[in-house]
Amino acid sequence: MKDQCSNGLQALFHNPDVATGSLGELLNHSSALLCKWLADAPNHGPRPGLIVQPLAEPDVAGKQIDELWRDLSSLMDGAYRPNHPGALAHLDPPALNVSICADLIAAGLNNNLLAEELSPSLSRLERSLCSWMARQIGLGANASGVPASGGSLSNLMALTCARRAANLQGRCDGVVLTGAGSHVSLNKALAVMGMEPDCLWRLPLDPEGRLLPAVLADALDRANQLGLPILAVVATAGTTVQGVVDPLRQMAALCKAAGVWLHVDGAIGGVCALVDSQRWRVDGIELADSVSLNPQKLLGVSKPSSLLLLQDSNHLRTCFSTGLPYMEQATADHGGELGIQGTRGAEVLKLWMSLQYLGLEGIEKILEGAFLRARSLRSLLEALPLHLLAGDLHLLSFNSAAASADEQINWRDRCHKQLLESGFWLSKPDWRDLPLLKAVLGNPFTSAMHLEQLASIISRSL
């Protein structure tokens, strides 16, 4: 068999008869390259710049490995550096070391969680871990879920389940009620589901950025009066600009009384429900019919890491099971029948290893650290002539208290430039007619000293 296959291609793959071989050399070189890049973060700003890139298209003959390493290094030089202490612009913290290693192992295993026979151990681990996480956030004994490649897909699957549960499949006249601060992935979800943009009712928020129960109650009544079927209500546990959490418990009560599916987009704040000390921040999340949760946003699990969790996991089977006639019959549901995705890599491995390594105490420390940094920065900025927006999590958005919009925009751009020159990257969202600066305090390398420097630069800019 070996002689028949010796055509030169074997050298491109790891030989099962060799302990390390060329793969070991490649792994040693790549890990050294990555560690060097991570260690070099203080010598660069956190925001990636545009650099000369290597050609995308391959040559007729493959490149020599040394040349490939050089090209890879140039790409890495133009990458965002999440472990830089000044990387505060987005919901992209540095990855846990153990998660990076798990990603590597998952790539090497190259298992497919489409079907049980392709990955029996990992498939069972995935089901068990999803069930534990659903129970841990309070969804009940029969709860479970499925991983997805991002919160947008989690939200899409949730609304698909909601539509079927309401017996509205095949209809495009249903409405989804949500707050004006909810994620844009809801617009995409309805587009994929064949529904018009006006089927998404973005309801007005209170001055702090939350959807008030009274506003939701009025919208439920209005939809009924118009004879429009309500597909779902979507609450947000952590908006992307402010990090505010809707009043989940009151919204759940309204949905239960109306017989309407409640989905909570907890991509940002849902992980708070994993530990008792922070569960109060998302109180009522356990009453939802479905929850999107993204460990990549705050816990440092490398991308992508998102889950859709449901009180009744049978909805996944009802919505997405098609049968896999080309696979052996499984003792449990094939992974590919529990969601939209068929072929899936072993993303569960990095989530499992990260949670196992952290433990509940480690999760708690990561959350506490992020919320402490947010409180500290808010305290430093409160004495300045700024308008600080409300927030419940680790995001802080603010703008100048100047009177005119032009003055606010000029100050924001000037301050943003000065911050970048000093190694701090904040984002520049425009929200509710306000030009804002936003800091995301999920970076564990941002110290109290860094926050004081940040506040000092902002103060001088004013």
Image: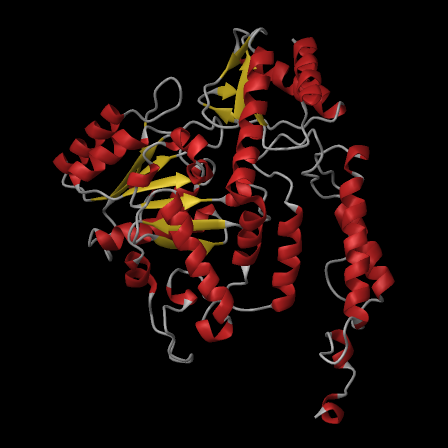
Residue 161 at x, y percent in the picture? 30, 53
Asked whether residue 191 appears in the rendered view, the answer is no
Residue 232: image x %, image y %?
Answer: 27, 43
In which quadrant will I find the C terminus? top right
Residue 398 spot, x, y in % from top left: 54, 18
Q: Image height check: is 457 above or below 139?
A: above
- Whether 282 is drawn above or below 147: the answer is above
Residue 191 screen position, x and y as percent:
37, 49
* Colour setup of the view: secondary structure
Which residue shows up at 28% across the image and 31% down it?
Answer: 249
Q: Residue at x 37, y 73 (%)?
A: 331
Which one is in front, 342 or 400? 342
Indicate whether 145 appears above or below 80. Answer: below
Please indicate whether residue 232 sits to the left or right of residue 224 in the image: right
Q: Is residue 22 above or below residue 383?
A: below
Describe residue 428's horizontal placement relative to residue 74 as left or right: left
Q: Quadrant of the N terminus?
A: bottom right
Quadrant hosting residue 46 = top right
Q: How many marks?
A: 0
Q: Is residue 397 visible?
A: yes
Which image quadrant for residue 216?
Answer: top left
Picture quadrant where residue 270 is located:
top left
